[in-house]
Image: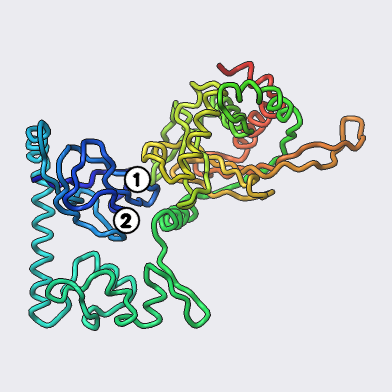
Amino acid sequence: MQDFILPDIGEGIVECEVVKWLVADGQNIVEDQPVVEVMTDKALVEIPAKYSGVVTKLYYAQGDIAKVHSPLFAMQITGEDEQSATVAKKQDTQVEAAEVEATAKQDTKDTAKSESGKALASPAVRRLARELEIDLSQVTGSGDKGRVMKDDLTSPANSSPVTQSAAATPVSTGGKRVEPIRGIQAAMAKHMMHSVFTVPHFTVSEEIEMDNLMQARAQLKASFEKEGVKLSFMPFFIKAMSLALEKFPIINSQVNADCSEITYFEDHNIGLAVDSKIGLVVPNIKGVQHLSLMEVAKKSNELVDLARQGKLSSADLKGGTISISNIGVLGGTVATPVINAPESAIVALGKIQRLPRFDENDAVKAVNIMHVSWSGDHRVIDGATMVRFNNLWKSYLENPLTMLAMTR
């Protein structure tokens, strides 16, 4: 028998929600077969089996919160995997022992409470009860020996209209609805609070004339399509940003919490804010400085597709050094973006508008304009530096031949 220990699935992630089991008790599975989908505070992740064998126990129900480094499911190892599993089990002994001890202590507490007339419930159920402000002693448990199960907390027989409205399945009552903030939404809320209250923001805005870039895209579009690559404006923005970062490495830096150190990154890992089905996520393209425009386009299309399917890996979401938020695709014109801490800068792109502008002879002409807004971390970036960086980035976009001449 072997317990599968939930691994570290992302930087700083300590728990995740079990969204869907892909296997059942007694089912034969093979190595690398997806076993369960879990929702971290950053992405929807599939957890694969490490060995071949038979599933003997699922430690969590769908909707439960699973802790990193705790047993997720148990299985009977079969065939050649038995020896490697034995070695792995020895390596996990300390972790498992700690979890068993914690479980035993909790079971002892639960048993004592049951014998004293108080409710018998698992830690996950107790946590949900606290969130829903439900008194477990007033709930009729449907489990073994009267154990309170998760479904019992949302049962109409055991909860008031107020607690029903706060349950995982929201219920409208009295003209309002209350539901818990979970998953990506919860992560974004916490992250934005941290960014706003710990990073001193300042903003620089500018207009970019898009006519030359629109022509360049039109000329390249067919050749990209022959390679099966959809060419949007985003790869140009990304590549131009990387070229500008070469001249302004401070924009691609991060400061530590007490402002005693600053780290400069050689790689330009440029993040794209994507409005996915599981919420706002910001995957990043690694090492843009080494990529051609074609390679950037391929990678950006791939990340956007994965984000919208909820299938980004934790690696896709980690290690970003600067971000782009494209509000223009949703019809937005102007925005003041919030820095994706610990990064030091982010830009918001507005929609393209055809507007009247004066030429060098003071004659009015129609120009395709995009409004952009930069937010910077004022602890390490000053306004003048941000303006100079933006001016260089803008020059590449308004004169795309100079940008393309410098790319691979």
Is 300 drawn above or below residue 141 in the view shown?
Answer: above
Is 63 drawn above or below residue 392 in the view shown?
Answer: below
Residue at figure coordinates x 14%, y 46% from the top left: 75
Residue type pointed to by label 2: Glu
Residue type pointed to by label 1: Val
Left or right of 158 on screen, residue 246: right
Residue 341 is situated, as x and y percent measured from the top left of the image, at 45, 46
Left or right of 171 on screen, residue 56: left
Left or right of 228 on screen, residue 105: left
Residue 69 is situated, as x and y percent measured from the top left of the image, at 20, 48
Q: In which image quadrant can residue 388 be found? A: top right
Q: Which quadrant: the N terminus?
A: top left
Residue at figure coordinates x 42%, y 53% from the top left: 184
Disc 2 crowd rating (10 Å Cα; few below 14, some 14-19, many 20+) is: many
Q: CA distance from mark 2 to mark 1?
A: 10 Å
What scheme was used to colour the molecule?
rainbow
Residue bearing mark 2: 17
Residue at figure coordinates x 65%, y 45% from the top left: 328
Mark 2 falls on what kind of element? strand
- Marked residue nearer the N-terminal end (2 or 1): 2
Q: Which quadrant: the C terminus?
A: top right
In this view, the residue in front, 183 or 3, is: 3
Q: In which image quadrant can residue 387 be found? A: top right
Residue 393 is situated, as x and y percent measured from the top left of the image, at 63, 30
Residue at figure coordinates x 28%, y 52% from the top left: 21
In this view, the residue in front, 340 or 130, is: 130
Q: How many marks?
A: 2
Disc 1 crowd rating (10 Å Cα; few below 14, some 14-19, many 20+) is: many
Residue bearing mark 1: 45
Mark 1 falls on what kind of element? strand
